[in-house]
Image: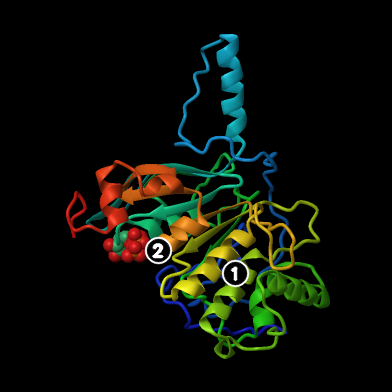
Amino acid sequence: MMSKNIISTSNLMFSSLCCSWASLRGARFFAPNTKTLSGCGSKEKKKIVCACSAPPRNMGDGLSSININDSHPVNSRREEREIESETDVLIECRNVYKSFGEKHILKGVSFKIRHGEAVGIIGPSGTGKSTILKIMAGLLAPDKGDVFIRGKKRHGLISDEEISGLRIGLVFQSAALFDSLTVRENVGFLLYENSNMPEDQISALVTETLAAVGLKGVEDRLPSELSGGMKKRVALARSIIFDNSKKIIEPEVLLYDEPTAGLDPIASTVVEDLIRSVHLKGEDALGKPGKIASYVVVTHQHSTIRRAVDRLLFLYDGKIVWQGKTSEFTTSANPIVRQFASGSLDGPIKY
Ligand SMILES: Nc1ncnc2c1ncn2[C@@H]1O[C@H](COP(=O)(O)OP(=O)(O)OP(=O)(O)O)[C@@H](O)[C@H]1O
């Protein structure tokens, strides 16, 4: 039932990346300039399975080091806790550098995303927020530094055979739906192409997933027949659907790139609540707990910062210059954060 020649023009953002759908395994993205998306086999892949059910323990800087030579019992207990807390880490960027020609964008970025977290990445325009999302997602490789997925170093990009154990979804600012496919085909795309699930089961799962994001009876519509807000919901449904017939269900991290950009304040609130609702600490539109283990939101919007995330990373001049709880953002004494939070022209950030 899937169209074999798909040309989507709905998103220009990844036009230079050209990643083939066949190579997207642990990650789920839609590369709109990929012209032929057929022939995606469902090969068995190597799995990295590790326990990852504990809630995040360290909401601080997440960069604490472990002294393995200190054998004092109190310290040992602390070490145990710290080592244990490392099992919470789903994605880690360690000392990541990235340049585009002469532009040195990321100059040693380090942070961890833990199980259960809702993290925002903020900072002035052009500081590399989208770039770091793409690096986390495996769509761009760092020039220097490493990305660890559940403790396992990623080599190369998303086609790398070694990395699995975590599903990573990227939700684009524009919904990036395939214009020529129905909502059902868009949402079930990954499963129609990559899973062994029968079509009627996929169709039922699509309906259930759409209901989870508050959409009913839109399965047969084309994207052009949807409002902007509905398209965002469909894109979200496409990111959270997964093959639930598998024995091992890997946790999923969703990466949202400016999900509320261009929306009016009320539409923004709807999307912000939707982001919360599909998280495991939330409750979806069907009243069921959300399934997303953790998420990262790149945003400029204050409402999204306040409403959709618990912890913030502030990226400026190639580095994380501040991180803290969302509640600390507006009270921080850091001059960069203060200027950004107030929108003042006076301060260390120069345009
Ligand atoms: N593929 C690329 N080739 C060349 N330059 C790039 C590429 N991707 C990003 N850049 C440049 O890197 C810088 C950071 O871009 P990025 O989109 O990551 O910033 P951002 O912080 O997300 O910006 P904004 O808040 O405006 O969306 C920009 O100067 C951008 O022009």
Are the residues tagged 2 and 1 within 8 Å (C-beta)? no
Question: Which mark sits nearer the N-terminus, 2 or 1?
Answer: 1
Q: Is residue 94 visible?
A: no
Q: Nearer the viewer, residue 118 or 252?
A: 118
Say few, some or many: other residues with alpha carbon within 10 Å of mark 1 (under 14 / 14 to 19 / 20 or more).
many
Ligand 1, by image quadrant, is bottom left
Q: Position of residue 307 (x, y in %)?
A: 50, 58
Identify whether 208 is placed above or below 138.
below
**Which amino acid, mark 1?**
Leu
The yes-or-no answer for disc 2 within 8 Å of ligand 1 is: no
Say few, some or many: other residues with alpha carbon within 10 Å of mark 2 (under 14 / 14 to 19 / 20 or more).
some
**Which amino acid, mark 2?**
Gln
Q: Position of residue 167 (x, y in %)?
A: 62, 56
Q: Nearer the viewer, residue 302 or 216?
A: 302
Q: Is residue 237 visible?
A: yes
* Residue under numbered circle 2: 301
Which residue is pictured at 38% across the width and 62% down the height? 300
